[in-house]
Amino acid sequence: MKKSASTIIALSATAAVILSATAAFASSHKVQNHRAPAASLTNWNNGIVAKAKAEGLVHGFGMPSNWANLGNMWSSFSKTYGIQTQYVAEGNMSSAEELQAFQKEKNHPIGDVGDIGISFGPTAVKMGVVAPFKNQYWNQIPANLKNPNGNWAAAYYGVISFEVNPKMVKQIPHTWKDLLKPEYKGLIGFGDPRQAAEQFDAVIAASYAFGGNANNVMPGIQFFKKLHQIGNWTGTTGSSAAMKTGQVGIQITWNYLSEADAAQFQGRPSIVTVVPKDSTVAGPYVEVINKYAPHPYAARLLNNYLFSNAGQISYAEGGAYPVRLKYIKLPVSVHLPALNMAHVHFLSGTFAKATATINADWAPMVLGQ
């Protein structure tokens, strides 16, 4: 899947091809290298709107249309402000790839904004590739979900869930322990937690279920080791395509991605979204602005829109939980599932210990490499 988490890796060959392909597009627009943002760009002001419209384009990395209703978000933003959007080609960039791309292209910037797992927020700051900006809703964003200097802020979160095809899976799993049952042999899809925030957070969720926590992820690693050993998970990566074609019958993913698949598939196949009863984690995703953004005003206008009432409602329409939920009124047509908060663990911080453990132990312990 799109999101990545625990290690900054070399930009993949695929991502390099993507960057090359989009360079021609970007070259047709005015591109400037903004190494140090002007004071007028660090906080919201009404003058941003006109300057953003003059730029006429905003380019997003790692923000695909099928992720948390971002397709509608992009469309609504463009219609509201008359600004062209570019996001399809780089939509499936991982968080690591987004930040690597910002760094790699700094002398010839392409991307303006990115959407990364919160575990990557501190990394982005350390790399020096993101610019500070406090939008007009800054004070309504919880303190633990934003960088105090404005370098990043979470706009929404999802909860780790089981996406299940009930035609392939007769007994629906409801706990992490259930996934170890023999009837799920060969049915589970899961990615690489060293590369994907989605899977990184799933390891933490499983850790809580078996006595660990965000600082002690060994129980989660041991769980996936057993899942792999018994053949319930054979190493197959979960994805919408894998669920659609029946390559897997269960994937471990965000609730809003499962709901998006259910809507897209229209019953072919049917999809059931299960939040594990024993433990899950709420994984926020943070919005970042490229320090070298070629369209710095449009980047900030989009950021402001993502946190506006319209933007937050759009996330909710896609099944994600907006961070400003208590400040907005959702339409009657939007129903976010109630969560048993006793079993939901919100993730924030640097995850240094979890990252180090997963990076060191995943290959030898889980994959036997």
Image (tube, rainbow, N blue to C red):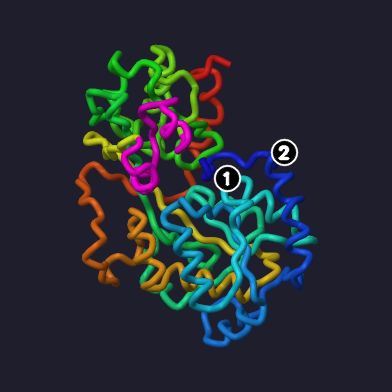
Q: What amino acid is at disc 2? A: Ala
Q: In the displayed structure, does residue 218 sit left or right of residue 122?
A: left
Rendered image quadrant of residue 179: top left
Q: In the displayed structure, does residue 12 sit left or right of residue 232?
A: right
Mark 1 Cα-neighbour bin, 10 Å: few <14, some 14–19, many ≥20: many
Q: Which mark is residue 94?
A: 1
Rendered image quadrant of residue 202: top left
Start and end of the magenta stretch? 239-268
Q: Name above or below for residue 114 compared with residue 301.
A: above
The image position of residue 369, as x and y in percent, is 58, 16
Residue placed under numbered mark 2 in the picture:
13
Q: What amino acid is at disc 1? A: Ser
The answer to whether residue 218 of the structure is visible from this angle is no
Residue at the spot 68% in from the left edge and 44% down from the top edge: 15
Residue at the spot 27% in from the left edge and 38% down from the top edge: 274
Q: Name above or below for residue 219 compared with residue 255.
A: above
Q: Name above or below for residue 215 compared with residue 148.
A: above
Q: Which mark is residue 62?
A: none
Secondary structure found at label 2? helix
Name the foreground residue: 247 vs 50: 247
Question: How many discs mark residues in the rendered view?
Answer: 2
Residue at the spot 48% in from the left edge and 35% down from the top edge: 241
Name the foreground residue: 121 vs 11: 11
